Image (cartoon, rainbow, N blue to C red):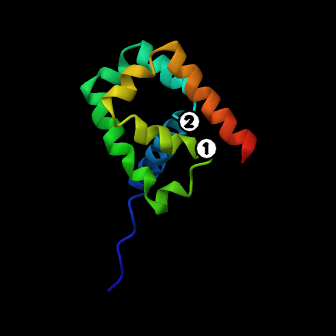
Amino acid sequence: MSQPEPNPDLRSANRARFELELEFVQSLANPFYLHSLAQQGILNQPAFVNFLKYLMYWKEKDYARFILYPHALHHLELLQHAQFRTEIGKDEWREYLNQKQFDHWRTW
């Protein structure tokens, strides 16, 4: 018995969602972007916190292979913690995270 052909509209919508979520997850590698989200209060919104939990699937091997900026996955993990979501709104935390990221790239 043959498999039915996937709906081209559904396939296109799934691809668009995949690309959009991939782009967003990769943006999490930028400490300045995280700081901006915190400053705007977005990181405290329950719906956004749930979205961050949902995005944890990107840490699975089948999805993580598409990530170009590995710090994005590390930051996604940190964003699961309320204390980090609060602290990244402070300038000194943004600078600390930025420096740690730079040091990692510099010495790798």
Q: Secondary structure at mark 1?
A: loop
Residue positioned 48% across, 62% down in the render: 61
Q: Which residue is mark 1?
A: 69
Tell me where residue 9 appears, x and y as whole percent: 41, 51
In this view of the protein, which residue sits in the foreground, 102 or 33?
A: 102
Which residue is depicted at the point 33% across and 34% down? Answer: 81
Quadrant for residue 30, please give it: top right
Disc 2 marks which residue? 29
Q: Is residue 8 above or below residue 51?
A: below
Query: Is residue 11 toward the left or the right of residue 66 in the image?
Result: left
Q: Position of residue 102 (x, y in %)?
A: 68, 33
Q: Does 14 sit above or below residue 36?
A: below
Q: Is residue 64 left or right of residue 46?
A: right
Asked if residue 39 shows in the view, the reply is yes
The residue that appears at 57% across and 24% down in the rendered structure is: 96
- Measure the alpha-carbon separation of dots 1 and 2: 6 Å
Residue 22 in sight from this viewpoint: no
Q: Which comes sooner in the sequence, label 1 or label 2? A: 2
Q: Quadrant of residue 7?
A: bottom left
Q: Quadrant of residue 79?
A: top left
Q: Quadrant of the N terminus?
A: bottom left
Q: Residue 16 at what x, y percent from top left?
A: 48, 45
